[in-house]
Image: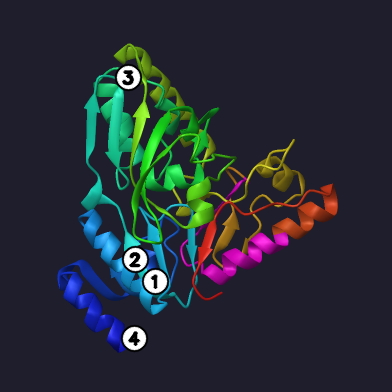
């Protein structure tokens, strides 16, 4: 099947847009992950539609990433297609107080544009290390703000190959989830509505949040961001710290000494190290406090 798939793939996508047996550690913020059979960088919607259609037709697994944050790829890699919607599809357009951006635009890029146009409401997202597509998919949030607070609609590709527009209500946002995640749709672009503000005030908020991130988060190490979702009525990082697990290591994976809600790659961590560390952390927190920690980091590949 693989040979036949490859022949069909090369007929629809330029070869220079495809990397074969590409190490995923090059494309994740964790700097962890074995090779993907096919790593494709599309530049237009029709290419995404064609690849998805081929994968669905031939039963080939596929997964869409942005800049690879919030993602743990198995050491054995991913047997299938990785579609990266990132810098090749990152256009941002502003009309009045409405920002329309492609899924590959980084949240930092959008925040910069909002600042330049004196639009407020996106400051919370400025330091989230992800793209708009991933942020919509998981309803990303920080410092009291969430994507659902500012998004008005999104254009998505369904598994059936239809390009449809979904309203905020139709996206069914929840805590770190949306209908996108549950149905396997692919975000192509989204519209955000902000409010007019004062540039210096917006910048001051962004600067303050940046200082908080630098002082509290282990940004100097590769990680996937917050490792666990926030349990109702608790904070994952505090539970982990109170369990005495700050600095706890398995191989090259470590519970950050700076913020216990982050698992970091100290330099040579494997996906297996991370998974085992997460398992032991959850086990101890559950035993001590009766609270089970649900992973926020997504896993793909052969674990």
Task: Say whether residue 142 is left or right of residue 59.
Answer: right
Q: Which residues are magenta?
A: 260-280
Which is nearer the N-term, disc 1 or disc 3? 1
From what the image shows, is residue 255 above or below residue 302?
above
Which is nearer the N-term, disc 2 or disc 3? 2
Residue beneath label 3, please? 119
Q: CA distance from mark 1 to mark 4?
A: 14 Å
Give the secondary structure at mark 2.
Answer: helix
Counting other residues with Cα less than 10 Å from the Cα at mark 1, is it few (<14), some (14-19), or many (20 or more)?
Answer: some
In contact (CB < 8 Å): disc 2 and disc 3: no
Residue beneath label 4, please? 2
Q: What is the number of the mark on residue 56? A: 1
Q: Nearer the viewer, residue 29 or 165?
A: 165
Res 42 visible: no
Q: Nearer the viewer, residue 247 or 127?
A: 127
x, y (%) of residue 117? 25, 20
Q: Give the residue drawn at x 54%, y 54%.
A: 182
Q: How many marks?
A: 4
Q: CA distance from mark 1 to mark 2?
A: 6 Å
x, y (%) of residue 204? 38, 18
Counting other residues with Cα less than 10 Å from the Cα at mark 3, is it few (<14), some (14-19), or many (20 or more)?
Answer: many
In contact (CB < 8 Å): disc 1 and disc 2: yes
Q: Give the residue drawn at x 38%, y 57%.
A: 65
For the N terminus, give its image quadrant: bottom left
Q: CA distance from mark 4 to mark 2?
A: 15 Å
Res 298 visible: yes
Counting other residues with Cα less than 10 Å from the Cα at mark 2, is it few (<14), some (14-19), or many (20 or more)?
Answer: many
Q: CA distance from mark 2 to mark 3?
A: 36 Å
Toward the top, the furthest residue is: 198
Give the secondary structure at mark 1.
Answer: helix
For the C terminus, give its image quadrant: bottom right
């Amino acid at each position: 099947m693989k040979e036949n798939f490859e022949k069909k793939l090369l007929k629809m996508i330029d070869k220079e847009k495809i990397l074969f047996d590409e190490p995923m550690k090059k494309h994740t913020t964790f700097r962890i992950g074995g090779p993907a059979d096919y790593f494709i960088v599309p530049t237009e919607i029709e290419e995404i539609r064609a690849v998805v259609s081929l994968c669905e037709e031939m039963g080939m697994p596929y997964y869409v990433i942005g800049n690879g944050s919030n993602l743990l790829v198995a050491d054995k890699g991913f047997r299938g297609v990785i579609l990266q919607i990132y810098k090749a599809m990152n256009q941002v357009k502003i009309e009045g107080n409405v920002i329309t951006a492609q899924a590959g635009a980084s949240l930092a890029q959008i925040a910069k544009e909002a600042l330049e146009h004196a639009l407020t409401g996106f400051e919370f997202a400025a330091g989230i290390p992800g793209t708009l597509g991933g942020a919509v998919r998981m309803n990303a949030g920080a410092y009291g703000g969430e994507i659902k607070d500012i998004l008005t609609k999104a254009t998505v590709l369904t598994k059936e190959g239809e390009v449809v527009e979904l309203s905020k209500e139709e996206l069914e946002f929840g805590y770190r989830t949306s209908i996108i995640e549950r149905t396997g749709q692919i975000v192509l672009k989204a519209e955000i509505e902000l409010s007019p503000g004062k540039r210096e005030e917006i910048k001051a908020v962004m600067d303050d949040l940046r200082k908080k991130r630098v002082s509290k988060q282990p940004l100097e190490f590769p990680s996937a961001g917050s490792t666990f979702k926030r349990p109702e009525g608790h904070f994952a990082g505090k539970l982990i710290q109170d369990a005495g697990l700050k600095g706890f290591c398995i191989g090259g994976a470590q519970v950050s000494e700076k913020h216990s809600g982050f698992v970091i790659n100290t330099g040579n961590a494997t996906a297996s190290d991370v998974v085992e560390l997460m398992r032991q952390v959850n086990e101890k927190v559950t035993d001590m406090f009766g609270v089970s920690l649900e992973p926020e980091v997504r896993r793909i590949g052969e674990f």
